[in-house]
């Protein structure tokens, strides 16, 4: 919560023409999820895991030495920018290592059978960070590094990452683009952020061809489009791939209340996506599911989405209701629209490509 993104106005650095307001990626949404878990009483049903700090070697599995050293030295002084739209303050290096370590802790806890599944409420987010540059508020690639831990340290043969953040999971795609052992699926608003990233035609390269699936939904997509994407693309692709562990990169910025995107998801929509991915994990990999927090910029609404997801993971429904759900469900166009259906129909063709090659099966 102490990671400091500065005083800029949302994503614009403060200056003589921009009055300071506060960065959109701040602690509030995350802190309020934690608080709602307490107020609802759900926290009493959860096992709280203490995250550890990731080691430098763990981060160097993906990121370059030069990049890691630069973040470390700027963080030891006044802070800086990790690359593109990623301001950070003093101490953010250590905090970013804790975010990576939190996701790694989650993997170990699930694989060791300490817990059934995990929601890793970490910050800063990670899915935009690439090998040698931080992008879109992300310093280190939390989920990609946790997937590398699962593969390289824990010896899993195949893991899958489902990214429901409204922005394209370019960093995760980038980390595994030529790797057939990690299936990456990103459902995002078409060409939002990063610009010109996340096309449906980007399916992987070399041996990794077929193991990257992008579903760029049109702006305005609601719960109907998301559920259809999961039923027709995400779950069938997971079934084809047969992962031994499933990650979710959980951005809650596809909600109808988010200032950084133009989708119409609700807390109940996220509940249904959680049910779908949880059912797939139970069917395919003993329920092993690690959900890592990413974006979400409506501090008022994000906590209700987070609560719905964690309720499903815990199998406990509290009686704390989402006070905005009725309003958002009544928005026009929540059901699947023909132009959204057309994108999903194209993405359905990619499912067969996620089947592992026989030589790669254990
Ligand atoms: Zn996002």
Image (tube, helix red, strand yellow):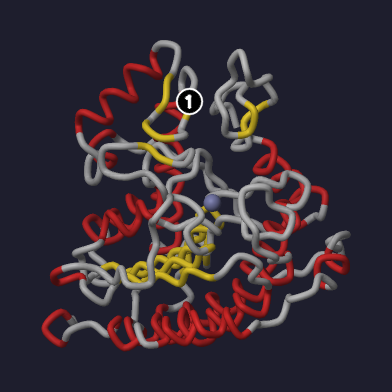
For label 1, the crowd category at 10 Å Cα-Cα, with few meaning under 14, some 14 to 19 and many 20 or more, is: many
Closer to us: 5 or 280 = 5
The reply, left or right, for residue 65 in relation to residue 339 is left
Of 115 and 166, the residue lying toward us: 166
- Image position of 292 with respect to 309: above or below: above
* Residue for badge 1: 88
Provide residue 98's location: percent of width, then percent of height. Answer: 44, 36
Asked whether mark 1 lies closer than 8 Å to ligand 1, one says no
**Residue 351 percent location from the top left of the image:** 36, 85
Q: Is residue 2 left or right of residue 308?
A: left
Instruction: Assign the N terminus to one quadrant of the image.
Output: top right
Picture quarter containing residue 135? top left
Q: In which quarter of the image is the C terminus?
A: bottom left
Task: Say if 59 sits above or below 182 in the image.
Answer: above
Seen in the picture, residue 80 relative to 97 is either above or below; the reply is: above
Q: Which residue shows up at 33% across the image and 58% down it?
A: 147
């Amino acid at each position: 919560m102490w990671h400091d993104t500065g005083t800029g106005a949302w994503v614009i650095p403060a200056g003589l023409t921009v009055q300071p307001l506060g960065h959109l990626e701040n602690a509030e949404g995350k802190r309020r999820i934690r608080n709602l878990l307490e107020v609802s009483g759900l926290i009493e049903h959860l096992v709280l895991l203490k995250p550890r700090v990731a080691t430098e070697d763990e981060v160097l599995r993906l990121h370059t030495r030069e990049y890691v050293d630069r973040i470390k030295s700027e963080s030891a002084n006044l802070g800086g920018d990790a690359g593109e739209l990623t301001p950070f303050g003093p101490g953010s290096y250590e905090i970013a290592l804790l975010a990576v370590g939190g996701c790694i802790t989650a993997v170990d806890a699930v694989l060791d059978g300490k817990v059934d599944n995990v929601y890793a409420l970490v910050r800063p987010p990670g899915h935009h960070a690439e090998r040698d540059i931080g992008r879109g508020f992300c310093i280190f690639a939390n989920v990609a590094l946790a997937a590398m831990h699962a593969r390289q340290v824990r010896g899993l043969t195949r893991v899958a990452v489902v990214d429901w953040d409204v922005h394209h999971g370019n960093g995760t795609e980038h980390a595994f683009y030529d790797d057939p052992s990690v299936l990456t699926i990103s459902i995002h608003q078409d060409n939002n952020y990063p610009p010109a990233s996340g096309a449906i035609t980007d399916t992987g390269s070399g041996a990794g061809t077929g193991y990257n699936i992008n579903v760029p939904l049109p702006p305005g997509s609601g719960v109907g489009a998301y559920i259809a994407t999961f039923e027709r693309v995400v779950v069938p692709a997971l079934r084809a791939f047969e992962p031994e562990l499933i990650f979710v990169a959980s951005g809650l910025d596809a909600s109808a209340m988010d200032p950084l995107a133009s989708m119409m998801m609700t807390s109940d929509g996220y509940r249904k996506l959680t049910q779908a991915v949880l059912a797939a994990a139970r069917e395919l990999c003993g329920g092993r599911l690690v959900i890592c927090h990413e974006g979400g910029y409506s501090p008022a609404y994000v906590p209700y989405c987070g609560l719905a997801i964690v309720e499903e993971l815990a199998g406990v429904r509290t009686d704390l209701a989402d006070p905005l759900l009725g309003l958002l469900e009544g928005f026009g166009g929540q059901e699947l629209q023909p132009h959204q259906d057309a994108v999903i129909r194209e993405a359905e063709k990619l499912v067969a490509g996620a089947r592992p090659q026989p030589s790669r099966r254990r």
